Amino acid sequence: MSRRRGHAGRASRRTAPSQRARRTSARNGALEIWKFGGASLATAENIRKAVALIAAHPGPLVVVASALGGVTDRLLAGAAQALAGDGKAVARTAADFLKRHRDIIRRVVPHGDARRALLAALDAAAREYRDLAVAIGVLGHIEPRASDTLVSRGERLSASILAATLTAARAAVYVDAASIVRTDGHHGGAAPDLAHTSRLAKKAIGAHLSAGRTPVVPGFIGLGPDGTITTLGRGGSDLSATMLARALGATKVVLWKDVPGILTADPRLVTDARLIPELHHREAAEVAHYGAKVLHPRALIPIAGTRIVLNVRSFIDTERPGTEVSARRSDLAHPVKAIATVRDQAVVTVSGKGMAGVHGIAARTFVAVDAERLSVSTIFQASSENSIGFTLPEAEADRAVRAISRAFREELSTGLIDNVTARPGMAVIAVVGDGMVGTPGVAARVFSALSNAGVNVVAIAQGSSERNISFVVREAEVQEAVRRVHTAFQLSKIGGGRPHAKPYTDVVFLGFGRVGRALADQIAAATDGAPVRVVGVVDRSGYVFEPRGLANRRLLELARAKEGGALVASLGGTRASAADALATIGSHAVSHPVIVDVTGHDHGALLVTALSQGFNLALANKKPVAGSLESYRALLDTARQSGRTIRYEATVGAGLPLIDT
């Protein structure tokens, strides 16, 4: 026994220097702040994945944790049920909260003191939640202060679980946000006190980092001046991360989310929306303000004007680089980077011929709106001063109209102001890009695209920074409007190459048999200057792709070799499936791409995917449109939803003259 103890002791002494070296290396590395969203911590498997990512990082880290996915909403819903007098629902909420966290703790935290302490803290938290919710039901109302206390349990428990799980792979410690984050007293949407927070964070977290430990901090919460728990509102955990980055002098913030990053547009509206590799802080703030839920504009405030880099990365596919937000200007080839939308809006208008030149009309309008704690997304005013308009959520329009009408009761009675109206069913679209500054013709391209689509613009606003053109359209026209502007600025090419000054139609052959080679000959022989070029050839073996267009000589070589039975992959091409080939081609800067299907196979599912990737279709193949009705409808529906075109010229009866074309 003694020999074993001696052997273990010698082993411990041998490993100690390497452990000290690792700690020294960690202390000397560049600090990063990693924030894991609720979806990233929703299950035991996800927590293990987060721990593996953290453990593999070589440098010092501070980790910010959100509540487990869905927990915050569930806790608030339980409080609402308590107000409605549904005591049984409150008990169920507390029981669900207890069971979900207990199951995860038992699956990810090893047996021992840490697990016992966590389970005891969980029992106490569930009990306190139930008692507080019952008290709310008895009182018949819920104070914002009580609401913040209720929901703070989610972040505190998830951070405690993550810290306890991480300890097995990396020295980690739980640090309560209430001990370091200071805010004002506005419960439900508190503003952080950056100076006070910086002093506390440097002292508390700095000591752990110096000792080689990884602090794990609950996001979303802080402490108000009166010592009560406050929450930071929507995007609060992201704000916690950027606030700590500034306080601690971190070089980078990584937000791990269930999305690939920030996209050029809402993919539900534009099927060929693309990941934006880089954004300036200013661009990201504009996109975030106008409805990009992946990032809240408040989260950017602490890092504005600094060299801190913010990365929005995919927790689902951790190999993807995501979007980098920094102070560096990039990709000047694209003056417009993104199109953001705010749906379900109303336009509220204060109008009257007697308003012109009258002092204080605008100020009184927005004081009345502010008194109702309503948030305005855009403001419009003509130089004639006959009207002032603004947009806000449709559900709040009536409150705004009533508040403004009360403020101008006398002016309405005397006719100085004609009316205060709300027009529901609107959407705000914002065209955003740092490269718009000083670039002539951007507005003209935006509104030409809308005009060509027959989209009526209700109101327009542009800030003096020139980084944002916002306009209002009817909700029914929002998809067409976004799609047309997205196409006009070739935003599907972001990250894949420069947009084309001269618009081409880029042709990709799916199959390169006799019909395909004949069409290639016609394109090559065109002498009328038609902007059509062949950029890719795909067959069953792989593909050949040249973003600038395949030279006529190269096409001729391919045609001769194919005639002799060769496959594309053996002719200097890339071996890949047809789906992978089209995905690769579609991710590059191809212009108005058209797939010409000259095969004899039913590629229905492949063509549906291609439509959603931004390709138009020209079919010399009858099978995709002569198969099942479901397959045919899927093609047409996808084309309509993605704004793409399908054209076909195919015979039946294997070429028998049954139809005169």
Image (spheres, rainbow, N blue to C red):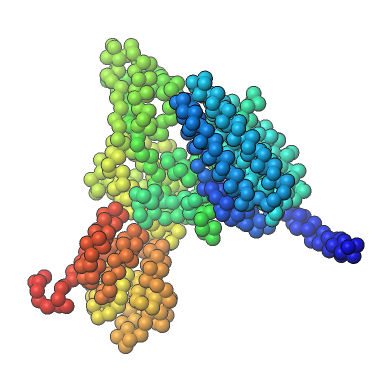
On screen, residue 224 above or below 262: above
Depth check, front residue: 41 or 185: 41
The reply to whether residue 293 is visible in this rendering is: yes
Q: Is residue 52 left or right of residue 266?
A: right
Q: Is residue 586 left or right of residue 323?
A: left
List the single residue furthest toward the right.
Answer: 2
Please count the marks in the image.
0
The reply to whether residue 193 is visible in this rendering is: no
Quadrant including the N terminus: bottom right
Q: Residue at x 76, y 47 (%)?
A: 210
Depth check, front residue: 560 or 510: 510
Q: Residue at x 48, y 51 (%)?
A: 259
State which quadrant residue 121 falls in: top right
On screen, residue 273 above or below 411: below
Q: Is residue 632 left or right of residue 33?
A: left
Image coordinates for residue 198, horizontal then vertical, percent: 68, 37
List the single residue furthest toward the bottom.
Answer: 564
Image coordinates for residue 335, horizontal then vertical, percent: 42, 50
Q: Is residue 80 left or right of residue 626?
A: right
Image coordinates for residue 283, horizontal then vertical, percent: 47, 45
Q: Residue at x 30, y 27 (%)?
A: 422
On screen, residue 313 above or below 18: above
Quadrant including the C terminus: bottom left
Q: Residue at x 69, y 44 (%)?
A: 116
Image coordinates for residue 504, horizontal then vertical, percent: 31, 64
Depth check, front residue: 507 or 266: 266
